Image (cartoon, grey):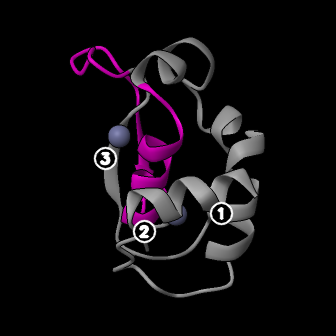
Amino acid sequence: MKRCELCGRAVETTKHHLIPKNRRDSPIARLCSPCHEQVHAAFTHHELKQDFHTVDRLRDADRLQSFLAWIRKTDKTDIRVKETERVRKWRE
Ligand SMILES: [Zn+2]
Ligand SMILES: [Zn+2]
């Protein structure tokens, strides 16, 4: 069974390149689509590359905690949050 490496839910996952813009050499994490979108909404490519290039670091990132606490309680995979709402959510 597939499992999202960030929220731990057993759902379909997508490939996230942990080092953006270096797809050939980048390690890959399997993230569900809401987590994947949230990661890219919360971090710039530069931040991902510099500071959040492992799943452990993403999982511990302050700005993802409220999102992760929420997503772990749902079984939704088709979440399409507007950018402003995403940004608001992770700032809470
Ligand atoms: Zn997830
Ligand atoms: Zn990605």
Residue 48 position (above or below residue 31): above
Residue 61 in the image, given as x and y percentages of width and height: 73, 39
* Mark 1 within 8 Å of ligand 1, using the beta carbon: no
The residue tagged 1 is 67
Residue 26 position (above or below residue 88): above
What type is the residue that disc 3 sits on?
A: Lys
What type is the residue that disc 2 sits on?
A: Lys
Image check: 25 left or right of 85? left
The residue tagged 3 is 15
Q: If the image is split into quadrants, where does the C terminus sit? A: bottom right
The residue tagged 2 is 2
Residue 34 in sight from this viewpoint: yes
The residue sitting at 24% across, 21% down in the picture is 23
Write down the region rendered in magenta: 20-44
* Mark 3 within 8 Å of ligand 2, using the beta carbon: yes
Residue 78 position (above or below residue 42): below
* Residue 53 within the magenta-colored segment of the rendering: no
Distance of label 3 from label 1 (alpha carbons): 19 Å
Report crowding for label 1: few under 14, some 14 to 19, many 20 or more residues within 10 A (C-alpha).
Answer: many
Q: Earlier in the sequence, mark 3 or mark 1?
A: 3
Q: Earlier in the sequence, mark 1 or mark 2?
A: 2
Circle 1 sits in a helix, a strand or a loop, which is it?
Answer: helix
What type is the residue that disc 1 sits on?
A: Phe
- The residue lying toward the viewer, choosing from 4 and 62, is 62
